[in-house]
Image (cartoon, coloured by chain):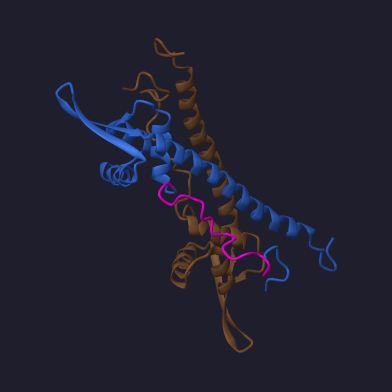
Chain colours: A blue, B brown
Amino acid sequence: MVNDSVLNESVPAGRFEYAGLDRLLHERARLGILASLAAQGRGLAFADLKRLCGLTDGNLSRHLAALQAAGVVAITKDFHRNRPRTTCCITASGRARFAAYLNQLEQVVADASAMVRSQKHAVRRAPLPHGAV
Amino acid sequence: MVNDSVLNESVPAGRFEYAGLDRLLHERARLGILASLAAQGRGLAFADLKRLCGLTDGNLSRHLAALQAAGVVAITKDFHRNRPRTTCCITASGRARFAAYLNQLEQVVADASAMVRSQKHAVRRAPLPHGAV
């Protein structure tokens, strides 16, 4: 089953574990939240972040709570024009962690794309069956 | 709060929703499973896939069930040397869907990386405080 393949028994265990890919950040909504905040040195209001990421109040709150608990984002509450305001920032360590995650993700995409291409080439290189034009 | 930023009110709603990113495939373990299978035209035995992806029986089974339900992988069961054997393959449409996902993911990584860099540059370009050497 594995003899005709680029993956044989010499391929080490965990070759496709992609363990370097930070699980906390590897979530579509969190990617959007962190990209928004990374571009925003002074933070974003909760309402703006919600609008940019196309999230509901509940979803954004849940993701922010997880990211805050890990020290990736910081959340401050104050009053602006007599109304309560929540501001979200990426922390310095959160920014570094996000940049490292993006580097890892870039490598994973390159690796997975190479796997897709390797098999396409293998199919293309296969001999034509008898009688094929 | 938003005046000093690359993100102002002219940025459209959902700018960072990354809606094109296929949620079924955007999971670390599934990325590994599909990269393994994409390189393997004739499929992989369950035990080999488990070894390559560093997953438990239960985790791999759950992910495969979700991918099979969506038509991304096909699973066949037969006997090999009198023992039951489970073989997993990526389907043709699953391969196309995975390739499309990887293309999207590459664009998202480039976009998010640009956000991280944009703020770094903004910080670098900021004037030095009075008295700074």
Residue positioned 74% across, 55% down in the render: A121
Q: Position of residue A67 (x, y in %)?
A: 34, 44
Residue displayed at 39% across by 43% down: A30
Secondary structure mostly seen in the magenta stretch: loop
User: Would you place residue B10 above or below residue B79 in this image?
Assistant: above
Q: Is residue A124 magenta?
A: no
Residue A55 visible in the snapshot: yes
Name the residue rendered at 38%, 26% in the picture: A41
B44 on left or right of B63 = right
Identity of the residue furthest to the bottom in this view: B82
> Does residue B124 lie above or below A17 as drawn?
above
Q: In this view of the protein, can residue B16 be seen by the observer? A: no
Q: Residue furthest top?
A: B130
The foreground one among B126 and B32 is B126
Foreground residue, B132 or A15?
Answer: B132
Farthest-out residue, left = A82
Report x, y in % for residue B83.
Answer: 58, 86
Residue drawn 31% across and 22% down? B1
x then y, percent, for residue A87: 28, 31
Left of A40 or right of it: where is B93? right
Left or right of A109 in this view: A25: left
Give the percent coordinates (x, y) of residue B95. Answer: 60, 57
In this picture, is A79 found above or below B14?
above
The quarter holding residue A72 reads top left
Query: What is the span of residues highlighted in magenta in the rendered image?
Result: A8-25
How many numbered dots are placed on residues in this image?
A: 0
Is residue A12 magenta-colored? Answer: yes
